[in-house]
Image (cartoon, helix red, strand yellow):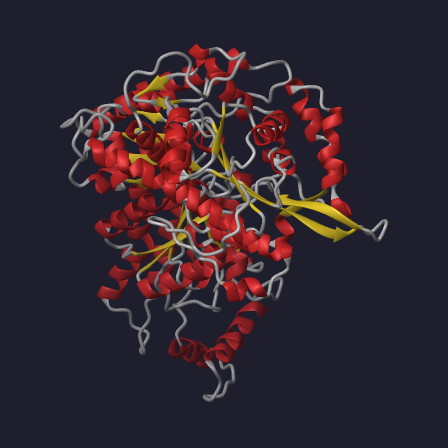
Amino acid sequence: MTLTKTASPALKFLEDRWDAGVAAALDEPELLRYRSNLLGSDLRITNFAGGNTSSKIIETDPLTGEPVEVLWVKGSGGDLGSIQRTGFATLYQEKLLALERSYKGADTEDEMAAMYPLCAFRGNPVAASIDTPLHGFLPFPHVDHLHPDWGIALAAAANGKAKMEQFNREFGRSLVWLPWQRPGFELAMMMKRAVEQNPGCDGIVLGGHGLFTWGQTQRECYLNTLSVIDSIGQFIERHGTAKGPVRFGGEAVPARQGRKDLAVAIAPFLRGRVSAQRRWIASFSDAPDVLQFVNSVYARELAFLGTSCPDHFIRTKIRPLFVPWAAGAGLDDLKAQIERSLAEYREQYRAYYHQFATADSPALRDPNPAVVLIPGLGMFSFGKNKTEARITGEFYTNAIHVMDGAGLLAEGEILGPVPQCQTGMDPASFKVFANYVALPALEAFRIEYWALEEAKLRRQPPEKELSRQVVFVAGGASGIGREVARLAAARGAHVVVADRDAEGAAAAAKEMASIAAPEFTASAAVDICSRTSIASALRATVAAFGGLDILINTAAMFPSSPDGVIPDSAWAAALDVNVTANYLLAEEAAKLFAEQGLKGSIVFTSSANAVVPKRGSEAYDVSKAALSHLVRELAVSLAPNVRVNGISPATVVKGSTMFPRDRVRASLAKYNIPFEDAWSDEELRNRLASFYAQRTLTHQPIDPADCAEAILFLAGPKARCTTGHLIPVDGGLSEAFLR
C-alpha cells in the first residue's frame, strides 16, 4: 500500500519525534540518518545495534556522470540510534538486483554476500550487512526492518499467522506473513515474491524474526513503522487485559528482601565461575519485568527454549542459564546450585556445538552463559565490558517481553505445524511452550556460527591490555593515583577511583569517563584505615562491575611539624596509614579474589626512603620500610592466585597532596633554595622537584606518570610471573641501591 498521508497516526505507546524544521534542512542521506536515529532512540522500537534502515537514492555516477539509483543501507554491526552518514553502506541498486541471475539457492548464501563489495558505490568500504538484499529487492524507496518486542511477540507466537490476520482486520492493515528463513539472499527472494503476490501490502512479519515496513518518502516510512508497531502493541494489550494480571503461569518464588545486597554478595563467585575461560564484566537487573519472569512458574521451561529473534541470541547465546534457588535457601546453597547448573550448561552447549558443527564451522566459543537467571534475585548479564554486559541484559529483557506477548496471544490448542515452519523443515524442531515458539537449535547454530557473523566479530577492534579488568585505585583523586586511574582507563580497564576526598574521587572518575566511557568508571569514598569503609568501597566496586581484578593503593601520609618534632599521635598515624591500611586493603580484597577464584594483582606504593635513612623523616621512612616487607609477606601468603608487588619512588612533588604549599616552602628554605613568596604553588613545586632531580643519576624529576607506568606494568599481564618485587622509580638514586 502506498501511503499518502504525512500526519501523525493515532499512537498510544510510541511518539512521533519527527521535527519538520530539522528535516527540511536535510538531504536524502541525512534524512535516512535522521529517520534511523529517531527509530533507534526508542528501545521499544528496536534493540541496540539491531535492525536495518535503507533508502534508494538517485546519485550521480562518478564514472559516467549519469544519474543512478543507489541503495543506502545500515552497515554491518551499526547502531540505528547513533549511526552517522558514514555508517551506511552504499551499493549500485542495478548491480545488486543483477545478482539474482547468479543466485543458485540457499546453499550459496556466503557466495552471494561476497559479491556485495563488488556492488559498492564510490568504493564505499563500509561492510554491507547480510540483510542488504532484503532491502534491495523490496520495490519501495524507503524500508525499515526492526525488532520491536510487540512485533517479535506476534512473529514468535504459535498462532502468529492467524493473529496477524486478525490484527489486519481489526486495524485495517495489510501485513503479510513469511515463515522462518535465515537472513540472506533466499529470504530476499521470498520477500520479493510475497510483495508481488500481495499487491497493496504494507508490511511483512518474518516468522520468529521481526518486522518490515516501508514508505514512498522518509516521513511516510517513519510514520508507517510507528503506526504498525504501536498498533501491534495495542492488539497485544487487549489480549493481556482480557487474560488478567497473571503472567508466565503466576509466581513460583517470591522476590527476596535485600536482593541487591544478595546480588553483590554472590556476584564475585558467579563472575569467577562464568569467567573460567575468559574474564567478563557483569551487570545486574532486578527490574519488575525481569523479576516477574525469573520468579514465575514457567521461567525454567521458557528459559531453556531460548530466544527466537536472531538479534537476541547473537548476544544472549542460544539460551540463558537458569539457576534454581528455593525460597528461604541461603547463599551456600545458591553457590552449589550455580556450580551444578553451570556444569550442565557447559555440557549442553558443547553438545549443541558438536551436533551441528561442520568442517568449516568457526571454532567452539566460550561455553559459559551470557545471561544468568536466579529466582527471587534477578538477572546477571555478562559482556567484555560494562556496556556490552548491560546491553546483553537489555536484549534478554526484550526476549522476556516477547515471550510474555506471545503467551498473551494464546487461544486454544495449536494443531499441525506452527506457521514459523516452512516447507522442508522439521516441524518437531520448533519447540513450543505457552504459545511461544523458539528458534530450532539448528537454525540458531547456523546464525551463531555463521561465517558471516564470524567475519563481523573479526572486524571488531582488538581489545586493549587491561580490557575486562576491574581496577580499584585507592588514593585515586590526586597525584600518582590519578595518573594510575587515567592510564588504566586508557588501557581499557574498568576503573573505580577511591579516595577519602569523595568529591575529588568523583571528579577524577568523570575525567576517566572522558578517556574511556562513562559506564567504565565509578568512584567511591574510602577511609583506608577503616576495614568497614574499605569493605563498603569494595562492595560498590562489585555492584558496579561484578568483581575485582587489580587493587592499587597510592595513598600515604608524611607526618611533619613546624618544629620538626613528631608527636606520638603522628607516629602512630603514619604506621596506620602507610602500613596497616595496606594490610587491611589486601585482606579485604583477598576475600573477593578467593570468591572469584581468578588470578588477582595488588600493587602498593612504598618509597626510596624505605632504604635511605634520613634525619627528621623517621616515622615515614620506618613505615615505608615496613610496607616494603609487607609486600613480600603478602606475596607469600596470597600465592599462587594473587600477585603482590610495589614501587619505590623517590620524592614525587607534582600533584601530591603530601606537598601542600607550606611544606614546599619549608623544604625550599631547608635546602637554601631561593624562591619568591608570590610564586604559584606549581612554580614552587617545580623548583623543589628540580632540586631533588639533581640528586639522581638521570637528573629527571619523578613524575606521577612515571610511577603509574611502573604500577600498571606490575599489575598487568606483562608481569604475570613477578610477585614480591618492588620496582624503584627514583631517577637513579644511588643511595637507594640495595646492598
Which residue is at the front of the view, 567 or 281?
A: 281
Q: Position of residue 149 (x, y in %)?
A: 39, 37
Locate residue 330 relative to residue 559 in the image: left or right: left
- Is 515 situated left or right of 396 in this image? right
Q: Nearer the viewer, residue 365 or 228?
A: 228
Whether residue 642 can be seen here: no
* Residue 75 sits in quarter: top right
Q: Is residue 228 above or below residue 81?
A: above
**Residue occupying the far left of the picture:** 328
Determine whether 690 is above or below 393 in the image. below
Residue drawn at 35 percent across, 36 percent down: 170
Q: Position of residue 189 (x, y in %)?
A: 63, 27
In this view of the protein, can residue 373 be seen by the observer?
A: yes
Q: Position of residue 171 (x, y in %)?
A: 38, 39
Q: Is residue 543 left or right of residue 138?
A: left
Q: Residue at x 51, y 11 (%)?
A: 355
**x, y (%) of residue 191?**
58, 30
Front in this rendered view, residue 479 or 296 = 296
Image: 707 above or below 183 = below
- Considering depth in this image, is 287 or 21 the residue closer to the camera? 21
**Number of disc labels:** 0
